[in-house]
Amino acid sequence: MTKAVRFHKTGGPEVLQLEDVPVGEPGAGQVRVRHTAIGVNFVDTYQRSGLYPMTLPQVAGNEGAGVVAAVGSGVTTLKTGDRVAYTGLIGSYCGERLVPADRMVKIPEGISDEQAASIMLKGMTVHYLIHSTYAVKAGDTVLWHAAAGGVGLLACQWLKALGATVIGTVGSPEKAKLAKAHGADHVIDYRKENFVERVKEITGGKGVPVVYDSVGKTTWEGSLDCLRPLGLWVIFGNASGPVPPLNTGILAQKGSLFATRPTLATYIASRADLEARSSSLFAIVKSGKVKIEITARYKLADVVQCHRDLEGRKTTGSVILLP
């Protein structure tokens, strides 16, 4: 048995319950991982609330890091004692669990378990967004919403390493300072300023080639207005709620725009992509160009408060649970 956070019905943070659940022995192609740190992400709240439907009851969480405690038959790439990390496997809010070995990556020397647990989803999300969804080049100016969030702070640093000019939106003066300190060239407090007008000012009226939008409902129209003709709107989250049904004619009216709704799962579906993206992520963290700041640690038993803080915009940077 292991301690795990489950929800038996969807709803607010209060539906999360710490329970004892069985673990079992790993089957063919599986390993049993003993978690040392568990990543917390906004997608966890979407699953818990019912925005992203799940089979119930469900153990919450999608990523973690730890040590291989047991190896199933047919597994040759991992051995007991290896430090590993993963993302995209629901059920991580627990002490131990069974996972498919081919979805694990080894944590290299120089990366801590806590760092690995906090960056697999966020870091590889940034990687695919800025290298694949839109390949950012030196000299590009990009708009990134929620620049002081966990993904945003990684993105600001990585974009600067690529030589881009970063415009970030935030919701408070404190978050503005944080985004600026992590490489954002221009920071817009959307509670005080009209971000569309400011982007037009910054770009001399041209707009940007790409907008990275994880906010959704409250930003989508403005995001389209910030794009130059043939620009790309990348909507990869909905922190303020889902975007309403979109009349695609708007894309024509605003300059033959492109829109995409990507997810990390597609971009790491193959083992080769998972290894390439995680290796690139670990390498840039080890280089010091992208620094990982774990700003809050919660015990598994305090998960309800953790989710309240996350949804209440009280957290910045990376948040982890400790089993």
Image (cartoon, rainbow, N blue to C red):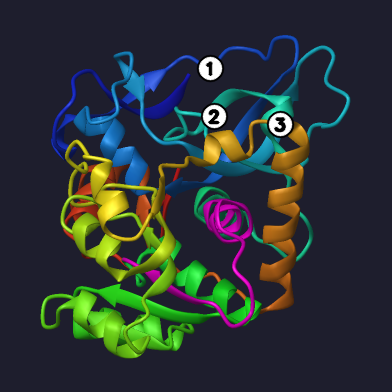
Q: Can residue 291 be seen in this view?
A: no
The numbered dot on residue 23 is 1
CB-based contact (under 8 Å), mark 3 and mark 1 = no
Name the residue: 73% across, 59% down. Answer: 280
Q: Which amino acid does label 3 sit on?
A: Ser
Magenta residues, start to end = 123-145
The reply to whether the magenta stretch includes residue 68 is no
Q: Position of residue 70 (x, y in %)?
A: 73, 24
Label 3: element kind: loop
- Horizontal side of 162 relative to 53 (left or right) equals right
Q: Residues within 10 Å of mark 3 (few under 14, many from 20)?
A: few
Residue 180 lies in quadrant: bottom left
Marks 2 and 1, how far apart in space?
7 Å
Q: Which residue is under mark 3?
A: 270
Distance from label 3 to label 2 (Cα)? 25 Å
Which kind of residue does numbered mark 1 sit on? Answer: Val
The disc, 2 or 1, on the residue closer to the chain's N-terminal end is 1
Q: Where is residue 120 in the image (x, y as percent from the top left)?
A: 57, 50
Pair 3/2: label in front: 3
Cα separation between marks 3 and 1? 27 Å
Q: Which picture quadrant has residue 43?
A: top left
Residue drawn where x is 79% and y is 61% of the image: 109
Residue 322: image location, x then y, percent: 44, 49
193 or 116: nearer the eye?
193
Disc 2 marks a residue whose amino acid type is Glu
Give coordinates of residue 192: x percent, y percent: 11, 82
Whether the residues at callouts 2 and 1 have beta carbons within 8 Å, the answer is yes
Q: Which mark is residue 96?
A: 2
- At x 81%, y 12%, the residue is 73
